[in-house]
Amino acid sequence: MTIEASQIVVWVLVFLRTGAFFLGIPLFAGKMIPAKIRTAFGLLLSLLINPMVPANLEIANHFAGAIILSINEICIGLLLAMVVRMVFFAVELAGHLISYEIGLMASNSVNPLLGSTDSTVTTLLYYFSLLVFFINGIHYDVLKAFVLTFEIFPIGTFFLTANPTADFVSEVSHVFVLGTLIAAPFIALNFLINISFAVLGKAVPKMNVFMTSFAIRILSGLVLLVSSILLITSYIVDNSKRSVEIMLKIIQPG
C-alpha cells in the first residue's frame, strides 16, 4: 500500500483542527489532563475520520500555502472549542456572582481542572456542570458535530469565508446573559435580606445588623443553592445542546 504526500498533508491538517479542538473543550482544557493524553486523543480521532474528510489542497502546493492552511485549521478548531466552552464560562461567571451575593467570595479553593484559584461556589458549579455535561451524553453530540464540521467546512476552505464574527460576538454576549440568569435568584435574595435588615436596624438600633445579616445571607444562600439545583441543571443542559447547534451554524460558509 502506497501513501501519497497529499494524504499525509490532509491527515496533518485534520490533526491540527482536532488537536486545537481538544485543547479548548471542557475537561481537556485544564492542566489536570496531561498534554500527551490530549495529543493522543486528537491523534486517534484524526486517524479515524481522515479517510472520509473532503479536502482541497490547491494552495498547499508550496510551503507558504501549507503554513496558511495549518493556521486556518488551528483557528477553526479553537473557534469550535470556544463555542462549546461558552456554557462553562457562564457557569463560572454565575459562581462568582453567587459567591459575592451570599458572602462567600473570600472562601477560595484550587480548581485542578483549570489550574486556577476560584471561589468555592465557582469550583463547585464548574464540577457540577461538567458532571451534567457528561451524564446527559452531550459530549457524544459534540463529537458528532465536530466530525460533521469537516463536511460543512472541508479542509482547505478558508476560515474567513464563514464570517463567524457576528455569531461569535452573539455567543459571548449570551455568556453574560446566562450567567446573570443563573445568579438572578441569589441577587434577589441578597437584595431582600439587605432591605429587611436595613429596616430592622432602624427598628432595633442596638442590634448588630452587619454580623447577623452576614450569617443569615450565607445560610439562606446555601439553602437557595440546593433548592435551585434543578433550575441550574436545566440551564446547563439546554445551553449545552444549543452550543452543539451553534458549532455547526458558526462555520456555515457565507
Image: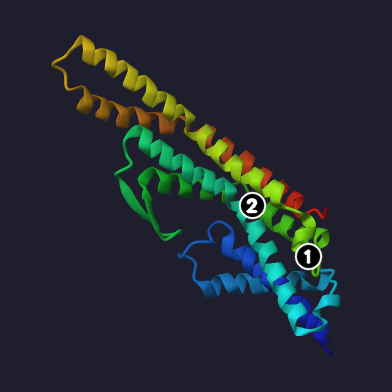
x and y, in percent, of residue 96 in the image: 41, 42
Question: Where 150 falls versus 218 (above or below)?
Answer: below
Q: Residue lying farthest left? A: 206
Between 154 and 28, the one lying in front of the other is: 154
Q: Residue lying farthest bottom? A: 2
Q: Secondary structure at mark 1?
A: loop
Q: Residues within 10 Å of mark 1 (few under 14, many from 20)?
A: some
Which corner quadrant of the image does residue 58 belong to? bottom right
Name the disc covering residue 158, or none.
1
Q: CA distance from mark 1 to mark 2?
A: 19 Å
x and y, in percent, of residue 78 in the image: 63, 62
If the image is split into quadrants, where does the N terminus sit?
bottom right
Q: Residue at x 47, y 43 (%)?
A: 93
Q: Is residue 78 left or right of residue 151?
A: left
x and y, in percent, of residue 179 in the image: 52, 38
Q: Residue at x 71, y 47 (%)?
A: 166
Q: Secondary structure at mark 2?
A: helix
User: Which amino acid type is shown beneath numbered disc 2?
Assistant: Val
Which corner quadrant of the image does residue 113 belong to? bottom left
User: Which amino acid type is shown beneath numbered disc 1?
Assistant: Phe
Q: Which colouring convention does the figure follow?
A: rainbow
Q: Which mark sits nearer the N-terminus, 1 or 2?
A: 2
x and y, in percent, of residue 11 in the image: 75, 77
Q: Nearer the viewer, mark 1 or mark 2?
A: 1
Q: Is residue 55 left or right of residue 18?
A: right
Check if mark 1's residue and mark 2's residue have beta carbons within 8 Å: no
Question: Where 155 falls versus 221 (above or below)?
Answer: below
Between 245 and 197, the one lying in front of the other is: 197
Name the disc covering residue 234, or none.
none
Q: Quickly name the residue at label 2.
A: 83
Q: Residue at x 72, y 59 (%)?
A: 146
